[in-house]
Image (cartoon, rainbow, N blue to C red):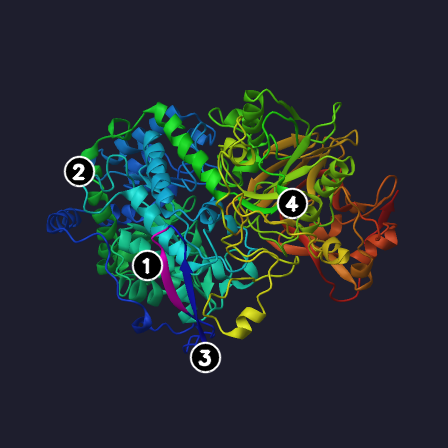
């Protein structure tokens, strides 16, 4: 089996001490069909925290005996509220609905709380309609309340999981779970798709911030407490009732360990690593009584988890003792071999109990009914899946609970971001902060100073709350969307004003009166899955806007404190070296005042709160130092020899133990400049540091900050291809010249890529053939651009469905683009009609002889 290592965690002051044997082997030989072999006997034998109840079993059997095939199939299908109505629930007897990342009641994901509750009542009433002889089985509504009920305007938004992992406070997780459940109940939902208990091993993954730690034992401890907070104690009368709702452990299994951190990718670890690293949180969640498990998009050695019966049935149920129901991820069933979105018996046969079929549910319903009646799907398997769903609904008491508005906490608007809930969120912010640097004990600050607060994250609620906040990617949010909240600047200003100091907000760092100190708040823009995947961990590749701001302030003799907002550890050693103090604040949520609590002293000079956060992820020494994971105290010497982070797992300074760290070694400049020169559009969104812009007929370009958008003759919106909103749909209406572009603020050098005969690849579908020339081009600064007409390749691709169009960089060079100073690597302009769906624009190796369309330059 090869060498193995032991991973342990012992955290002072916490009842948390555990070890796990972690294998360093690869999976054993594959089975005859190529899939990795599963050995259930090596997995621990566990028992769910929820014991069987004979009375509930009798009710399940009675309901099942009175259900038609259509009734049963309805229970196993979940539709998105953007694609289903209460009348559909009434007609098809659907057992569940959900609101996807950008879905909301009546088509408005920014609807106010009463509107959510109103539609919840309507879905419930439809499910309870017994006309036509139907059974009354209450519908469940699932929602991504993943860091608080973060879908809802006015709710408490907690730090994302990566920050909570740094807090090392499992008991706090139970409180957060309780509050999340209550604030979800208020607006009518009774099921959350949380917690995410992935153990991330490669921080390039776009969902890294949804993980508590790279250490499985932190995830194990947190999963138990979060499930208990959301669901309650299984032996208590209010289990799944009153202030509690159904929790979901996700995404089973190994989503945090995919190769190169690719979302929905392939986990190549051994079965022992799958067990000891990636299943740690599931083991404790099941012991806590979790009632739903969401199955991952990802593969294990080439086999989709949604089709892996051995892991879903033999391991999850047979060995780990799970006794709730499984639900697939968003249209994940359509990725199984031989399946489509509308037809996939394989997922049900593999152990999926409920299909999440947001917009494909109607076709899936019809085909599944037919397959049950034909015997292709055994009735016994359908009954098993329906029984599991009914069992959880009965445990949750929904048959007796009445409509959501009459259940506990329904419509209690004062519970949303109540002072008590905000206090817990503020505590979570304080505890999550990790102090990386504090030279000469600059912190904590006296609050009575003249304090300059700068940086693009200083007063930006979107940056501090991150993805999965109101909108799926966390984009398009404004301060008005958070009426009961506090930005980082507002929290600082409150304390400085209270001490008769002078706070000043200046995003660009300019000032009239020289400040005593500058606090610069900056970091990643919001993103979620897919869009958040990165080629490496460099911050601001090809750009140095935030670094220049830090340097400018420092050059003027102003002490500088950097507060970094991010969803993962990143390489930004240059920024750390410039700052006098540096705080990793992660994605703190709506209570920005928690940061001020730790940065400032009390007015009397005493310390308010010390830093207690410790890194739950290792911090990289260079942009490409990933995977990078703590080996554990009992790891063999060679594992420790190769573990060389900039800041190790568990690192964190505090006021009680001051220490200067001096100058840190920086990676070569060239490694940063070339960090993200190969991807410009990823999953339908501009890849950092590029910005999506649109040009009107006058030639004026504007950033596209929110979709849908209409600028001149071009309209832009989001669409689905392989995942939710992973496509940019663009249509030119022919009323004038218009275009789109991906632009940057710092030129990049593509000379090497051009000489290497790389090509610009557009992954697209032509929805409407071009009626005029279509100019693909780039820019290289003022009065420097070039373009070539690609109308003919687009016409050829019109009937090809999803395809790729490759244009050699050498063609753009021949047209006059200066490849050593590219500021816009991609633009597309036409005066005619054209409809495109774009999912990616990136550099790929050129194939075959270059064929260059006619150029146009300026």
* First reached walking from the N terminus: tag 2 or tag 1: 2
Which type of secondary structure does the marked residue at label 1 adopt?
Answer: helix
Q: Residues within 10 Å of mark 3 (few under 14, many from 20)?
A: few
Q: Residues within 10 Å of mark 4 (few under 14, many from 20)?
A: some
The image shows residue 267 at horizontal and vertical percentages of 48, 65
Between disc 2 and disc 3, the foreground one is: 3
Residue 776 in view in this figure: yes
Q: CA distance from mark 2 to mark 3?
A: 61 Å
| Nearest the eye: 251 or 576 | 576
> In the visual, does 373 lie left or right of 196?
left
The image shows residue 637 at horizontal and vertical percentages of 53, 74
Q: CA distance from mark 1 to mark 4?
A: 42 Å
User: Are discs 1 and 3 less than 8 Å apart at CB?
Assistant: no
Which residue lies under the disc numbered 1? 283
> In the visual, does 736 lie left or right of 498?
right
Q: Which residues are magenta?
A: 14-21
- Magenta segment, prevailing SS (helix, strand or loop): strand
Which residue lies under the disc numbered 3? 2
Which residue lies under the disc numbered 4? 439
Which residue lies under the disc numbered 2? 133
The image shows residue 177 at horizontal and vertical percentages of 35, 41
In the image, is residue 740 above or below residue 494? below
Which type of secondary structure does the marked residue at label 4 adopt?
Answer: helix
Residue 851 in view in this figure: no
> In the visual, does 82 lie left or right of 684?
left
* First reached walking from the N terminus: tag 4 or tag 3: 3
User: Are discs 2 and 4 less than 8 Å apart at CB?
Assistant: no
């Amino acid at each position: 089996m090869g060498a193995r290592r032991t991973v342990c965690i012992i955290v002072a002051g916490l009842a948390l001490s555990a070890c796990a044997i972690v294998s360093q082997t690869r999976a054993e030989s594959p089975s005859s069909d190529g899939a990795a072999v599963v050995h259930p006997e090596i997995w621990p034998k566990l028992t769910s925290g929820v014991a069987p109840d004979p009375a509930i079993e009798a009710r399940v059997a009675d309901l099942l005996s009175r259900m038609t095939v259509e009734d049963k199939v309805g229970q196993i299908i979940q539709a998105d509220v953007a694609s289903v109505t209460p009348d559909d629930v009434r007609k098809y007897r659907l057992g569940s609905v959900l609101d996807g990342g950008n879905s909301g009641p009546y088509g408005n994901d920014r609807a106010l709380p009463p509107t959510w509750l109103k539609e919840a009542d309507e879905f419930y009433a439809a499910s309870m309609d017994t006309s036509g002889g139907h059974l009354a089985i209450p519908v469940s509504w699932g929602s991504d309340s993943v860091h608080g009920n973060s879908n809802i305007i006015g709710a408490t938004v907690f730090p994302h999981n990566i920050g909570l992992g740094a807090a090392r406070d499992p008991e706090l997780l139970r409180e957060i779970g309780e509050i999340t459940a209550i604030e979800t109940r208020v607006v009518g939902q009774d099921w959350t798709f949380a917690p995410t208990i992935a153990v991330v091993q490669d921080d390039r993954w776009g969902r890294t911030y949804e993980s508590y730690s790279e250490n499985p034992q932190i995830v194990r401890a947190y999963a138990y407490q979060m499930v208990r907070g959301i669901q309650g104690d299984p032996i208590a009368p209010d289990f799944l009732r009153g202030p509690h709702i159904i929790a979901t452990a996700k995404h089973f299994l190994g989503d945090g360990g995919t190769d190169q951190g690719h979302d929905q990718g392939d986990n190549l670890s051994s079965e022992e690593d799958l067990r000891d690293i990636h299943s740690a949180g599931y083991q404790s969640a099941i012991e806590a009584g979790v009632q739903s498990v969401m199955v991952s998009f990802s593969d294990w050695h080439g086999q989709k988890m949604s089709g892996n019966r051995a892991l879903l049935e033999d391991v999850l149920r047979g060995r780990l003792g799970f006794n709730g129901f499984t639900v697939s991820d968003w249209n994940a069933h359509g990725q199984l071999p031989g399946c489509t979105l509308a037809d996939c018996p394989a997922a049900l046969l593999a152990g999926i109990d409920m299909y999440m079929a947001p917009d494909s549910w109607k076709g899936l319903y019809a085909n599944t009914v037919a397959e049950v009646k034909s015997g292709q799907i055994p009735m016994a398997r359908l009954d098993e899946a329906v029984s599991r769903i009914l069992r959880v609904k009965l445990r949750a008491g929904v048959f007796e609970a009445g409509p959501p508005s009459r259940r506990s906490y329904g419509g209690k608007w004062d519970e949303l971001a109540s002072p008590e809930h905000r206090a817990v969120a503020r505590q979570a912010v304080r505890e999550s902060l990790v102090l990386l640097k504090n030279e000469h004990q600059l912190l904590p600050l006296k609050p009575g100073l003249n304090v300059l607060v700068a940086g693009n994250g200083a007063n930006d609620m979107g940056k501090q709350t991150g993805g999965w906040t109101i909108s799926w990617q966390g984009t398009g949010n404004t301060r008005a969307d958070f009426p009961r909240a506090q930005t980082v600047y507002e929290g600082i200003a409150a304390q400085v004003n209270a001490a008769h100091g002078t706070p000043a907000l200046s995003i660009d760092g300019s000032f009239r009166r020289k400040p005593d100190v500058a606090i610069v708040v900056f970091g990643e823009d919001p993103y979620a899955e897919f869009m958040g995947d990165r080629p490496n961990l460099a911050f601001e590749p090809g750009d140095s806007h935030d670094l220049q701001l830090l340097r400018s302030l420092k050059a003027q003799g102003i002490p500088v404190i950097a507060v970094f907002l991010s969803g993962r550890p990143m390489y930004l050693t240059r920024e750390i070296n410039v700052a006098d103090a540096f705080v990793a604040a992660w994605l703190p949520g709506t209570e920005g005042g928690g940061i001020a609590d730790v940065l400032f002293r009390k007015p009397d000079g005493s310390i308010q709160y010390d830093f207690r956060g410790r890194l739950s992820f290792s911090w990289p020494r260079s942009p490409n130092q990933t995977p990078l994971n703590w080996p554990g105290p009992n790891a063999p010497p060679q594992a420790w020899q190769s573990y060389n982070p900039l800041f190790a797992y568990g690192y964190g300074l505090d006021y009680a133990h001051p220490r200067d760290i001096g100058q840190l070694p920086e990676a070569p400049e060239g490694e940063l400049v070339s960090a993200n020169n190969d991807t410009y559009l990823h999953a339908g969104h501009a890849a950092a540091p590029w910005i999506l812009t649109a040009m009107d007929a006058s030639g004026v370009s504007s950033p596209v900050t929110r979709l849908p958008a209409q600028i001149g003759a071009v309209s832009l919106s989001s669409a689905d291809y392989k995942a939710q909103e992973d496509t940019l749909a663009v249509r030119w209406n022919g009323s004038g010249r218009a275009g789109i572009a991906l632009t940057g603020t710092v030129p990049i050098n593509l000379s090497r890529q051009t000489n290497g005969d790389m090509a610009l690849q557009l992954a697209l579908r032509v929805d409407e053939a071009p009626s005029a020339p279509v100019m693909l081009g780039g820019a290289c600064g003022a009065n420097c651009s070039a373009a070539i007409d690609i109308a003919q390749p687009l016409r050829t691709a019109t009937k090809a469905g999803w395809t790729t169009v490759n244009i050699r960089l050498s063609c753009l060079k021949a047209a006059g683009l200066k490849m050593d100073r590219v500021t816009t690597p991609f633009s597309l302009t036409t005066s005619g009609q054209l409809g495109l769906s774009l999912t990616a624009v990136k550099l790929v190796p050129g194939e075959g002889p270059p064929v260059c369309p006619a150029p146009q330059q300026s």
